């Protein structure tokens, strides 16, 4: 399976939908080629995401609000880079602790990158389910898009199985074999939830507990997410 490629394609599908609508002169786009993607998503242009796999995972209403941050990452390696920077900043604040070069997704070889990617996608899917919005019809649409993206039936079956499972932060956290991977999984989850939702925030808090994230690292991941999202 090539899970990293699927994460890339999921995010690219949303970006392509937005760019297509923007070229058509949708609200929120400036004539000079600038514009704020986050504001665009909150306005009428957010409907461009409807039907894309990333919107189905986020929920169309949440896609308008949260999707701009997620789409600005551009792919799995970019997410790994943000986690790397957050981890290094956190390390530098801990003068008494030994430091090491973080092994995030953007810095590990295959097949380790595939293991990272599967853990990250598992975290994204778990966070997407936290508000209970993914029904059987939406799951089938997601399955169809995954096959269209990758042609990989094994990967489709794996994603479908993950979407069918009950939400379980402990099961997700069990995939975090290193502190860096825990940070990446938390960051990916953070992109997929609405922190103003009590249910989703409670899920994120429990995931952080199960991942055994240091509070300082967790705070740095939130700050890094905001910086990357613009």
Image (cartoon, rainbow, N blue to C red):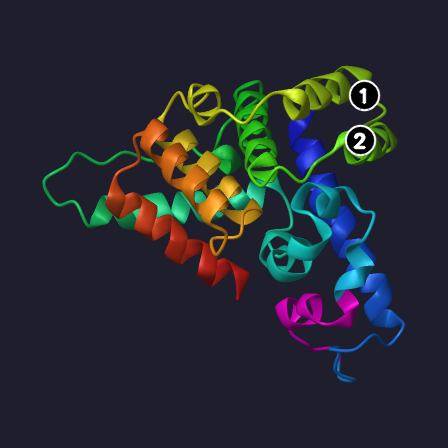
On the rendered structure, is 199 left or right of 86? right
Crowd rating for badge 1 (residues with CA inside 10 Å; few <14, some 14–19, many 20+): some
Question: Counting residues from the N terminus, which is met first, the one under dot 2 or under dot 1?
Answer: 2
Residue stretch rendered in magenta on the structure? 33-45
* Disc sitting over residue 146 in the figure: 2
Q: Is residue 153 above or below residue 221?
A: above
Which element type, helix, strand or loop, lies under badge 2? helix
Picture coordinates of residue 142 (x, y %)?
A: 79, 34
Viewer-proximal residue among 163 and 177 = 163
- Contact? badges 2 and 1 (CB < 8 Å): yes
Which residue is identified by label 1? 152
- Say if the magenta span includes residue 130: no
Viewer-proximal residue among 191 and 126 = 126
Find residue 37 and report its image quarter.
Answer: bottom right
On the rendered structure, is 25 left or right of 229? right
Which residue is situated farthest in the left direction here?
96
Viewer-proximal residue among 150 and 156 = 156
Quarter of the rendering occupied by the N terminus: top right
**Could you tell me if residue 105 is visible in this image?**
yes
Picture coordinates of residue 197 (x, y %)?
A: 50, 52
- Say if the magenta span includes residue 42: yes
Counting the numbered discs, the total is 2
Q: Identify the residue at image location x=69%, y=65%.
A: 41
- Could you tell me how far apart the alpha carbons at marks 2 and 1 are, in whole angstroms? 8 Å
Picture coordinates of residue 216 (x, y %)?
A: 25, 47
Which element type, helix, strand or loop, lies under badge 1? loop
């Amino acid at each position: 399976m090539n899970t990293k490629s699927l994460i890339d394609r999921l995010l690219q599908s949303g970006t392509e939908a937005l760019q297509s609508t923007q070229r058509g002169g949708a609200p929120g786009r400036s004539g000079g080629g600038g514009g704020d993607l986050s504001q665009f998503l909150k306005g009428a242009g957010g409907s461009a995401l409807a039907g894309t796999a990333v919107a189905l995972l986020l929920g169309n209403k949440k896609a308008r609000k949260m999707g701009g941050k997620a789409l600005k990452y551009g792919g799995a390696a970019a997410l790994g880079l943000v986690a790397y920077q957050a981890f290094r900043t956190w390390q530098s604040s801990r003068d008494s602790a030994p430091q090491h070069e973080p092994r995030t997704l953007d810095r590990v070889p295959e097949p380790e990158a595939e293991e990272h990617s599967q853990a990250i996608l598992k975290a994204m899917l778990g966070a997407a389910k936290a508000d209970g919005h993914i029904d059987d019809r939406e799951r089938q649409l997601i399955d169809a898009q995954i096959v269209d993206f990758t042609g990989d039936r094994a990967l489709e079956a794996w994603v479908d199985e993950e979407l069918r499972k009950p939400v379980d932060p402990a099961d997700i956290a069990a995939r975090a074999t290193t502190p860096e991977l825990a940070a990446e999984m938390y960051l990916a989850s953070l992109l997929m939830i609405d922190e103003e939702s009590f249910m989703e925030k409670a899920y994120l808090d429990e995931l952080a507990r199960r991942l055994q994230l240091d509070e300082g690292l967790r705070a740095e991941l939130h700050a890094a997410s905001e910086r990357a999202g613009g």
